Image (tube, coloured by chain):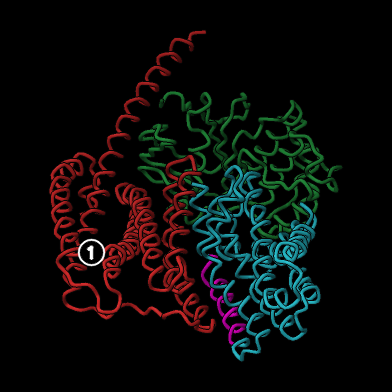
Chain colours: A cyan, B red, C green
């Protein structure tokens, strides 16, 4: 248990201090939701209706944007070899590592969603619902990005490849998380169901994806 | 059986016999199937002649999914038992499956125009097939990006197997997603009720597509093996040349 | 010899090693379709040392990775004790790859504390081992500010901290200067005196007493 905590803390610390930390995904997310109305047009009704879905999509993009960092550096600087040879099971280690790094860099997203709700004229309640769903979705999003990142680690310009691999895997989380915000906005009673589904997909990925990441890491080291 | 055919010569012997048989079967079945689809079956009482698109569309969608199952199955066999032939099959199946997926999407769109009044409708089935295409593309892109053949094989196998779990959850979530959407005034398409006069051409076309896919897979497996053998001979030459050079150089 | 005995006194007292034998039999390895090693047998007893030599591209790194269980050989097997290497690697191996596994923004103190914790070695061993390798003064410097040689020394400290009986080192002396190589030799001598064993791939001539040599160039 203490090893698990040590990996989590180290990865969170490294992600926080290196490469801009949480500022990168936060800035990207803010830029995306700032530019979208300029493309869609300023109609308040349209923006409020599209807002929850748009923000869910923008959050997914900001996770993908930072996904290259998850395993790329560790692959080239030899850390991944050491992790694979460490006395801790590799899947558990990958879980701690990915979540540590993901939470350290992505925690601002649900906060910015609340701000975005104001900008798009989404009422507070659906905004809160979306923020909660996004917070629940972050473990799933970052683990799936980690799986793609481990498969593509060390590949030149791996960002695009990671996006292509991870995008279809993120479909369910996107549907449920953005769906929570959308249903909340439309006054649909299924908002809560969407939130619960988001959380269950997240729990499912926490249970399953670490084995996939470990297999991906091993396949790339051998 | 697979380990029996992992011997390249044995596989080559099999492929040489199987390829012409599959070729003939494909041409024959496609011929019969196309005849039945266009002339040997009545127009639908509701859809008219547009129902004939079904005979090229449904088998393509079925092949898109069946080939992904084959890709994942081959990947599993490679991952567990390390048979090189299983990996070769996975590599060869992917682009063929992707082409069938594109065909399914394209014919689906053609069919959608008279059915829905739009070329593209975000219905659950079409969306799932679109995601399947992305999965195929991701698999091929990963294999293409990894230079080391062994790494490409293993990483590809891991991704292909994960894709199965993913596609199941995608199917569920997309169904859920489209049920949230209020049904619009366009005709809801829930698959035609199959009449026996439509069943025959459909079954034969499905069989013809299967033979076509099998033919292509075997053909590409064999040409891949030939290319690999040529590369191996080249490498051996290079290695021998280098060895000769280094024994000369070691005197210095 | 005198210098060495005084240096030995500065080594930290770590939990005793449980010495292991390493045995590879009938090992065949290929990389990118090229056969590197075919039917290789090797054995290493506790306190032993083996130097892998040979020109670039002869498979020294691949062999080390196979011995560590990271690469699965095309044929043959690697055993540590009487277990397959891939199963017990984590509890028996100290690994130094061609990269040191350091993070540019992380200080050596933070990094080495982490690895000490991971391997259950007391943190008090960090500074003495760093002094042995002559980098005691650099403990609060981020790895990115160090020279390649200093990074290599830090990597070697990490290997020693793992307190594992079997060291696999890929070009340990690559970027080291003369003094660094002497300190490496002392570290290895200390390790072997405790029953540990070492396999190192190297281009330099490393003067480790009683070390066996294996020229992989022969296998080409």
- Left or right: A61, with B136 as reference point: right
- Left or right: C53, with A63 as reference point: left
- Left or right: C141, with A50 as reference point: right
Residue B93 in the image, given as x and y percentages of width and height: 33, 52
**Is B120 placed above or below B98 here?**
below
Q: Is residue A207 magenta?
A: yes
List the residue tagged with mark 1: B206
Q: Quadrant of residue C171?
A: top right
Residue B44 in the image, given as x and y percentages of width and height: 25, 75
**Is A47 placed above or below A9 here?**
below
In the structure shown, which secondary structural element does the residue marked by tag 1 occupy? helix
Which of the pair C12/C171 is nearer the observer?
C171
Q: Residue at x 66, y 31 (%)?
A: C173
Task: Assess disc 1: are there few (<14), some (14-19) or many (≥20) residues with their C-alpha within 10 Å of its C-alpha.
Answer: many
The subunit carrying tag 1 is B
In the picture as drawn, the residue positioned furthest to the bottom comes out as: A189
Q: Quadrant of residue C179?
A: top right
Which of the pair C159/A198 is nearer the observer?
A198
Q: Residue at x 40, y 43 (%)?
A: C73
Which residues are the magenta region? A193-210
Q: Is residue C166 magenta?
A: no
Which of the pair C145/A67 is nearer the observer?
A67
């Amino acid at each position: 248990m203490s090893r698990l905590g040590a990996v989590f803390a180290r990865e969170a610390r490294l992600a926080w201090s290196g490469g801009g930390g949480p500022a990168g995904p936060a800035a990207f997310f803010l830029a995306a939701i700032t530019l979208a109305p300029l493309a869609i047009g300023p109609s308040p009704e349209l923006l409020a209706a599209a807002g929850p879905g748009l923000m869910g999509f923008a959050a997914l993009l900001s996770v993908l944007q930072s996904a290259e960092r998850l395993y790329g550096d560790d692959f080239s600087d030899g850390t991944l070899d050491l992790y694979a040879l460490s006395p801790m099971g590799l899947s558990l280690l990958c879980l701690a590592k990915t979540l540590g790094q993901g939470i350290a860099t992505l925690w601002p997203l649900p906060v910015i969603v609340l701000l975005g709700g104001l900008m798009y004229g989404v009422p507070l309640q659906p905004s809160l619902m979306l923020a909660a769903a996004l917070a629940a979705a972050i473990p799933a999003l970052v683990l799936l990005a980690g799986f793609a990142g481990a498969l593509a680690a060390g590949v030149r310009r791996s960002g695009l490849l990671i996006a292509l691999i991870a995008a279809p895997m993120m479909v369910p989380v996107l549907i449920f998380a953005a769906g929570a915000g959308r249903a909340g906005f439309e006054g649909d009673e299924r908002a809560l169901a969407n939130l619960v589904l988001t959380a269950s997909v997240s729990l499912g990925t926490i249970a399953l994806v670490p084995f996939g990441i470990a297999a991906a890491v091993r396949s790339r080291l051998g | 059986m697979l380990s029996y055919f992992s011997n390249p010569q044995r596989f080559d012997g099999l492929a040489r016999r199987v390829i012409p048989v599959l070729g003939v079967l494909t041409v024959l079945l496609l011929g019969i199937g196309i005849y039945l689809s266009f002339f040997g079956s009545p127009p639908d009482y509701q859809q008219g002649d547009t129902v004939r698109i079904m005979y090229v569309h449904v088998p393509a969608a079925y092949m898109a999914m069946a080939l992904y199952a084959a890709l994942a199955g081959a990947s599993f066999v490679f991952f567990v038992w390390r048979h090189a032939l299983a990996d070769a099959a996975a590599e060869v199946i992917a682009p063929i499956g992707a082409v069938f997926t594109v065909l399914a999407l394209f014919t689906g769109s053609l069919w959608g125009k008279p059915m829905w009044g739009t070329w593209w409708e975000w219905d659950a089935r079409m969306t799932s097939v679109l995601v399947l295409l992305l999965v195929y593309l991701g698999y091929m892109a990963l294999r293409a990006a990894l230079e080391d053949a062994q790494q490409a094989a293993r990483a590809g196998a891991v991704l292909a197997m994960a894709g199965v779990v993913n596609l199941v959850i995608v199917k569920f979530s997309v169904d859920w997603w489209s049920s949230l959407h209020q049904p619009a005034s366009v005709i809801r398409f829930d698959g035609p009720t199959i009449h026996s006069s439509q069943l025959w051409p459909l079954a034969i076309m499905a069989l013809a597509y299967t033979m076509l896919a099998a033919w292509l897979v075997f053909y590409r497996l064999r040409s891949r093996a030939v290319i690999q053998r040529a590369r191996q001979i080249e490498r051996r030459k290079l290695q021998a040349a280098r060895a000769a050079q280094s024994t000369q150089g070691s005197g210095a | 010899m005198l210098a060495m005995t005084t240096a030995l006194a500065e080594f930290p007292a770590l939990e005793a090693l449980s010495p292991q034998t390493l045995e590879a039999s009938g090992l065949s390895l290929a990389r990118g379709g090229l056969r590197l090693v075919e039917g290789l047998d090797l054995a290493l007893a506790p306190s032993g040392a083996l130097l892998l030599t040979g020109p670039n591209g002869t498979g020294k790194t691949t062999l080390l990775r196979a011995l560590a269980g990271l690469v699965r050989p095309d044929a043959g097997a690697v055993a540590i004790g009487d277990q397959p290497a891939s199963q017990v690697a984590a509890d028996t191996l100290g690994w130094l790859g061609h990269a040191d596994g350091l993070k540019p923004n992380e200080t050596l103190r933070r990094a080495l504390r982490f690895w000490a914790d991971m391997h259950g070695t007391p943190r008090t061993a960090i500074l003495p081992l760093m002094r042995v390798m002559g980098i005691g003064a650099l403990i609060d410097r981020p790895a990115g500010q160090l020279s390649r040689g200093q990074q290599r020394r830090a990597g070697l400290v990490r290997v020693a901290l793992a307190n594992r009986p079997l060291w696999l080192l890929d070009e340990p002396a690559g970027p080291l200067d003369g003094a660094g190589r002497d300190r490496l030799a002392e570290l290895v001598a200390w390790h072997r005196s405790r029953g540990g064993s070492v396999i190192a791939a190297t281009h330099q001539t490393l003067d480790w007493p009683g070390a066996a040599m294996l020229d992989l160039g022969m296998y080409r």
